[in-house]
Image (spheres, coloured by chain):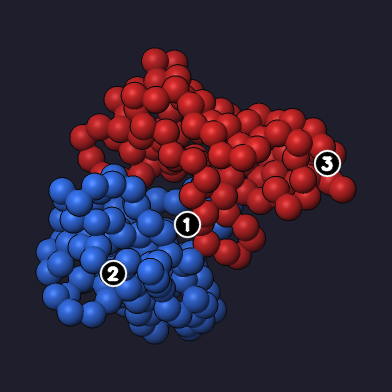
Amino acid sequence: NAGVMQNPRHLVRRRGQEARLRCSPVKGHSHVYWYRQLPEEGLKFMVYLQKENIIDESGMPKERFSAEFPKEGPSILRIQQVVRGDSAAYFCASSPPVGQGARDTQYFGPGTRLTVL
Amino acid sequence: KQEVTQIPAALSVPEGENLVLNCSFTDSAIYNLQWFRQDPGKGLTSLLLIQSSQREQTSGRLNASLDKSSGRSTLYIAASQPGDSATYLCAVKGDSNYQLIWGAGTKLIIKP
């Protein structure tokens, strides 16, 4: 069983460019969560998605950030017009559908480290 | 609003010592608490998950305890080894939601 996969693992962008981070959940998982970890800090929740639905985006910055989890394919976290303060590690987690047990357990990917020059 | 605090922020001990990492949370209405390990530049490894109805969990040299009423959890590492050097993160899941609320971590260095 493949775990949560994220790519790229490292991403370098110049200020003003767009960053697209991908997350493929564990096979059969229909819930995806994105977290951001700023340097020397703990993780902060950004957004919770189910297939084709954004359930909670209360942790997402109001501008420039968006997320999707289409019916087919990986979840995408998109950051437009990146700024230096966006430099961080972005972690994706997934969990199974309700009723299949362990919905509360989130399985984490290796993260994408974004550096904005 | 749930807040999670980890003390100390950093800890350096000689190899072989037993040690305790602390995690405290402000809202006792939690669903579970989880300890993770993070190596520099790497992802997260789940170490132990304690459900709110449990008092402790053990895995090898690791033992995690939970005292919901006082809002505390400890991670006990026995007979520490240099390979235990990493940042240890504590995360709490609330009763009424799915978000994990994280502490800032304890950076542990085990000296050979």
Q: Are marks 3 and 1 in contact (CB under 8 Å)?
A: no
Q: Position of residue B28 (x, y in %)?
A: 35, 22
Question: What residue appears at the point 57 percent right and 64 percent down from the top-left corner?
Answer: B42
Q: Which residue is mark 3?
A: B15
From the viewer's perspective, is B90 left or right of A94?
A: right
**The disc label shown at residue A27, or none:** 2
Callout 3, which amino acid?
Glu
* Residue A50 occupies quadrant: bottom left
Pair 3/1: label in front: 3
**The disc label shown at residue A37, or none:** 1
**Residue A47 seen in the figure:** no
Q: Position of residue A92 (x, y in %)?
A: 37, 63
Q: In the structure shown, which secondary structural element does the residue marked by tag 1 occupy? A: strand
Q: Quadrant of the N terminus of chain B?
A: top left
**Colour applied to chain B:** red
Pick whichever of labels 1 and 2 is earlier in the sequence: 2
Q: Position of residue A79 (x, y in %)?
A: 33, 74
Q: Characterize the local packing of mark 3: few (<14), some (14-19) or many (20 or more) Cα atoms within 10 angstroms.
A: some
Chain that is blue in the image: A
Callout 1, which amino acid?
Gln
From the viewer's perspective, is B33 left or right of B39?
A: left
Question: What residue appears at the point 49 percent right and 41 percent down from the top-left corner?
Answer: B48
Using the image, name the chain to which the residue with label 2 belongs: A
Pair 1/2: label in front: 2
Callout 2, which amino acid?
Lys
Number of on-image labels:
3
* Residue A3 occupies quadrant: bottom left
